[in-house]
Structures are given as C-alpha cells and as structure tokens.
Amino acid sequence: MEKTRNIHVWIYSALGAGLLAALLWGFAASKDARALEMSNENQYNRAFHELAGYVEEIDTLLAKAQLTKSPAQLAKLSSDIFRQSAEAKSCLGQLPINDVQLDNTSKFLSQVGDYTYVLSQSMINGEEISQEEYDSLSSLNEYASTLSSTITDMENRLYSGELRISASRPSGRFTSASAADGGIIEDMENVEKSFEGYPSLIYDGPFSEHIENRTPALLDNERDISQNDALSAAREFLGGSYELELEGMSENTAIPTYTFTGYDGDGEVSVSVTKKGGYILSYLNSKTVYEEKLDMDEATRKAADFLQDKGFYSMQNSYYEKSGATATINFAYVQDNVTCYSDLVKVRVALDTGEIIGLEAKGYIMNHCERELSAPPLTMEEAREKVSTGLEISGTKLALIPKDSMREVLCYEYKGAFNGRNFLVYVNAENGREEEIFLLIESEEGILTV
C-alpha cells in the first residue's frame, strides 16, 4: 500500500513538474513572440516615418524645380529628388503591405526622380525646358503634395496610437485585428487611388511610358500565325526531323511566342517562334560540350555563316563571352556602314565541332527596321576634337547607340587606349556631345563592355 502511494506521489510530482515546465516555456515563448512583434512594429513605424519625410522633401524640391532657370541649380535639385525618391521606394518596400497593389505609387516614385534628371541634362546641354515640360513638373508636384498630405495624416495617427502597422504572420500579411482596428489596408488602397488619374509621361528616360508600351519593330504589320505554322517554322529552322511538342505559349509579353521542345540525342532542344510573323526568337540546345578545339576566329566564322543562312543579313560581330567549351558571340546589324547596336543577335557556338547550340534574337526583333540615315553634320575629324587628348585612338566608325529611353543616337565610335586599358568613346555626330564612354574588359573569357 505504501509502495503504491509512493508511486502515485512520484507520478503526480512528475506531472506537476511537466505542467510547470510547459507553463514556463509557454510564458517564455509568448514573451519572445511579443518582443518580436514589437521589434517588427518599431521597424515598420521607422520606415513609415522616413517615408513621410522623403515624400515631403520631394514635394518641396519639385516646387523649387519649377522656379529655377539655372542649369546647375536644376541639376542639384534633380539629384536630390532622385535620391529622395529612391529612399522613399526603399521605405515603401519595407512595409508589410503585400496585399495592396501600389503599382502607380511606385511608378510615380520611379518617374519623378528620373524625369527631373532628364530635364536637368537638357538644360545643361543648352536646351530650353518647354511649357509642356513645366506643366508636367507642376502635375508631378500636385501628386507629390497629395501623397505627402495623405502620408502625413497617417503618420499623425501612428503617433496618436489610432493606427498600427503590425504583421504578426510570417508572410508579412496584416492580421485581421490590425486591419480592422487601424484601417491600414484601406489607407494604403486610398494612397494608390490618388494616382488613378496619373498622366502618361513620355520623355527621354528609362521609366518613360513609351518604353513599357513598345511593340516589336520587326513584327509591325505581320499577321498572327497558327500553332502548326509555328511548328513548321521551328522544324525548318532546326533543319532536322525533330519530334517537337508544344511546351507552352506566352501571351502577356512584349513578344508573344510558341515554344516547342524536343530531343536530338545529345540533349533537349527548345525553340521559341513569334506568334506574329513566325520569326525565331530563341533557340537552345542543352547538349554538353567537353572539348575546346576551335579558336574564336573559327567560331565567329561559324556563327556568321549560320546567321547568313538563317536570313540575318549584314551582321557584324562585336563582343563575345566564353563559358567552358562554348562561346556566345554578339552580332549587330549594319546599314550604310553604320553599326546599329540595338539590332542585337547572340549566337552560341560549341567549340568542339562549331555547331550552333543557341540563338537569342530579342534585340533584333524589337528594334530592326531600315533607318533613314543621312550624312552626319559633323565630320569624323570635327567630332574627334571632342575626345580627350589622353585617348590614343586606334579605330573609328559610325554607330547608332541606344540611350536609356531606347532612343537611338548617331555617333562616332572612337576606340583607343588610356593608361593601359581600352575604351570606347561615343560622340554625337550631330552636335558633338559626348554621349557614352565604355571600358573594354578583355580576358581569356571574352571581350565585354562596362
């Protein structure tokens, strides 16, 4: 009897100790969870307060930009706006607002810095800012003021405790309690709604509206083809009796395509054919290449012959990159002795047999057309006077180069050496403006530009 009672006492003691341990563990875990939630909320609050400050500063800087007539002053203001807008986007990205689409808000923050920078460069180059451009600045200022007012109001509610930014779920989604109590999701949706009438900005910069809405130049006036027609184009390109199957169709892209796959015994083959016109957008053979037998001159000739055979005429090789026993060689279209760098085709060559195992023609399809090229106002010698005397020039040619806005500029390309390294300097053939300077990175693995 005594022994049984001792066993019961031991069992109850063990259960009690286990329960106490569980309670202590639960308390500690709850405490850690609350500490983590508080830490996260403090980070969100800090990011929001900084966002408010950056947006307010953008509003002020835009007002100043409309008054300045000084190129140096506008350059300074645009630099400040660019920096503040980048910081604002960073803060916006730190907030747990995955459930809210802020496409227009983000677009505004991208464009406002970019647009003012482009205007400042125009003024530095002696161009007058048009009334239309001043009107665009004024419109951007109005949107910045509205955004600043909305964000400041939310910031005040954060300070008063009326609004909370919390995300206790690992995904970063707002809890239903915080959404209902603080109305944060509705507030952020209202921020986005304030940009519903945001105008399209067309300008010479990378975030211009026209870039997003570009259509492939080569496919203008081409008709849609059927899946069977695309399959025939893929088989003709491969030149073999491949058993190809449709892998998929891409519709919501700049270049809608049919993609087919098959096997050639050495690896998988993939070919993408444009839905308009039936052009080959890309080709890839996944075969493994073990030996490097061909030098780059031989590989380049193989690639050039391949392009000629496939209907890519008047193409000139430029730079290349090697990876293992394969080489990817860049080719650009040449019209009237002018290299059109936008019309880019990349060819991948196996360095054992010279077989072409890859093609990428997106640049060519997006940009290729016959340009109206006329004799440049400046001669090669006149433009050369704009190049630094420190550059030992070894070669010169005419080239069309794409700017960030995808606008093409006719330039003289001067290749030369400076301090033991090779450079490319591009001088505008119309006004003598120095447009670009690239460093040539030359190694055993290829020739690239930075």
Image (cartoon, rainbow, N blue to C red):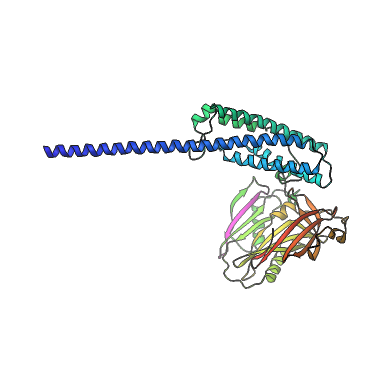
84 or 342: nearer the eye? Answer: 84
In the picture, residue 151 is in which quadrant? top right
What residue range appears in magenta?
A: 254-266
Which residue is nearer to you in this view: 211 or 214? 211
The residue shown at (71%, 60%) is 439
In the image, what residue occupies the spot 63% across and 51% down? 258
Relative to 219, residue 323 above or below: below
Residue 288 seen in the figure = yes
Q: Position of residue 60 (x, y in %)?
A: 71, 34
> Relative to residue 254, is residue 65 drawn left or right?
right
Viewer-nearest residue: 247 or 106: 106
Task: Check residue 265 for magenta coloring.
Answer: yes
Quadrant for residue 436, please give it: bottom right
Q: Is residue 371 magenta?
A: no
Q: Is residue 261 left or right of residue 333?
A: left
In the figure, residue 73 lies in which quadrant? top right
Quadrant containing the C terminus is: bottom right
Q: Horizontal and vertical percent for residue 254? A: 68, 47
